[in-house]
Amino acid sequence: MQRMAGSRLGQWPCLVVCMLILLKAEGASIPITIVETAVSSGAVCLDGSPPGYHFEKGSGSGIDNWLVHMEGGGWCESVESCVSRRDTFRGSSSKMEKTMGFSGILGSKQAANPDFYNWNRIKVRYCDGSSFTGDVEAVDPETKLYFRGERVWQAVIDELLAKGMQNARNAILSGCSAGGLAAILHCDKFQSLLPATARVKCVSDAGYFIHGTDISGGSRIESFFGQVVKTHGSAKNLPASCTSKMNPELCFFPQYVAQTMRTPLFIINSAYDSWQIKNILAPTAVDSKKEWKDCKLDLKKCSASQLQTVQDYRTQFLKAVNTGLGSSSTRGLWIDSCYAHCQSGSVSTWLNDKSPEVGDTKMGKAVGDWFYDRSAVEKIDCPYPCNPTCVSVDSES
């Protein structure tokens, strides 16, 4: 492309300039901002490098509106697993790409993101492995691991507040997967840092991980999340409204945290979330004969009994949603039956002609209607495989 543009530069003087303008308009190359000042307060990634985020400034009517979206990427529950992340982009800002494109909920095109396209839009990079909850002062001289996720979150938020978010009129804290969980865990704290007059809400995409039962009848996810909390020293940073009532390690599960949340929460999730089916329902550790291997990759390959178990997981999931959010008048739900994980970050699933629908409503419209109180939104899909609009997202799971 560059060579072709260069050879035709005399004929098409606008070509390069127009392409750059187009790329900027689509948010195709938003540079990373490294929070160098965070190092002095120990707010660092697993390897000790400063945290980073990508920021596209708002304009026009969106100048005082802020959407802070936290990147996902799983967790590390032990020193060994955190060491394996430390020297990758999941544990070091020095390994992160220097630019990033925005799409979906972060997109800058009005037609594809009408409610949020001109907001200040931020993607916070994920480099701590604890959904931004860890805080251990000591650093092992051998592993040189820093468990400082909570400090990272606070350092980034502090910088955004100083850049104008302290004057926000509207604000959303959102995230996908581990970032979606972080949006729930930090939701009330985020709201408390903004003006009392601001409309502040939270959106969790594929972050509603349930305290579910696996195919062995146990709950490996409970022990896994418990290890994350212990390794990262997260308990003291989880919502006190939850930790004061139960074992703090259980407060990594949204269904317990959401019960006492004050800030309105919107859940985007598949009732057949592909990560949860693979890791909560049928983790490899309890599938010694690998009977679930094919089924986990493609629900069409499940046996009749496996599919019934998957349907039972949907029942577990919906029960956990109701346990957490109850009949709250401020809750928003868009729960589809697509075998997918993280759906708000792509224009193809957020809001375009072929995006999945639940109750004739696309995700992007549902979130906008709920945020601006245009209508209550509680969209729960019929059981798999009933939704023909899922075709566009099955391949992205």
Image (spheres, rainbow, N blue to C red):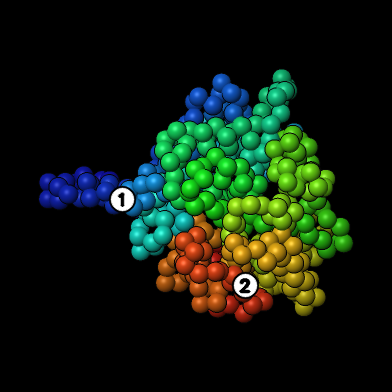
In the displayed image of the protein, which residue is found farthest to the right? 217
Amino acid type of the residue tagged 1 in the rendering: Gly
In the displayed image of the protein, which residue is found farthest to the left? 11
Q: Are marks 2 and 1 in contact (CB under 8 Å)?
A: no
Task: Classify 10 Å Cα crowding around label 1: few (below 14), some (14-19), many (20 and above).
Answer: few
> Label for residue 60?
1
Circle 1 — which element?
A: helix
Please state the horizontal and vertical placement of residue 194, each as a whole percent of the image: 51, 42
Amino acid type of the residue tagged 2 in the rendering: Ile
* Residue 303 shown left or right of residue 84 in the figure: right
Is residue 378 positioned above or below 224 on the image? Answer: below
In the displayed image of the protein, which residue is found farthest to the front? 197
- Tell me where residue 249 sits by quadrant: top right
* Residue labelled with disc 2: 380
> Label for residue 276?
none
Please state the horizontal and vertical placement of residue 349, each as a whole percent of the image: 49, 64
> Front-most of 316 and 220?
316
> Front-most of 284 and 322?
322
> Front-most of 267 and 332?
332
Q: Is residue 353 visible?
A: yes
Q: Which residue corresponds to the image point at 71% horizontal and 20% vertical from the top-left?
A: 141
Q: Which residue corresponds to the image point at 49% horizontal and 43% vertical from the top-left?
A: 195
Task: Give the spatial CA distance, label 2 vs label 1.
Answer: 35 Å
Q: Is residue 1 visible?
A: no
> Front-most of 78 and 5?
78
Task: Classify 10 Å Cα crowding around label 2: few (below 14), some (14-19), many (20 and above).
Answer: some
Please state the horizontal and vertical placement of residue 103, each as a whole percent of the image: 43, 55
Q: Nearer the viewer, mark 2 or mark 1?
A: 1
Q: Which of the marked residues, 2 or 1, is nearer the chain's N terminus?
A: 1
Circle 2 — which element?
A: strand
Please state the horizontal and vertical placement of residue 206, each as a whole percent of the image: 62, 57
Q: Which residue corresponds to the image point at 58% horizontal and 77% vertical from the top-left?
A: 387
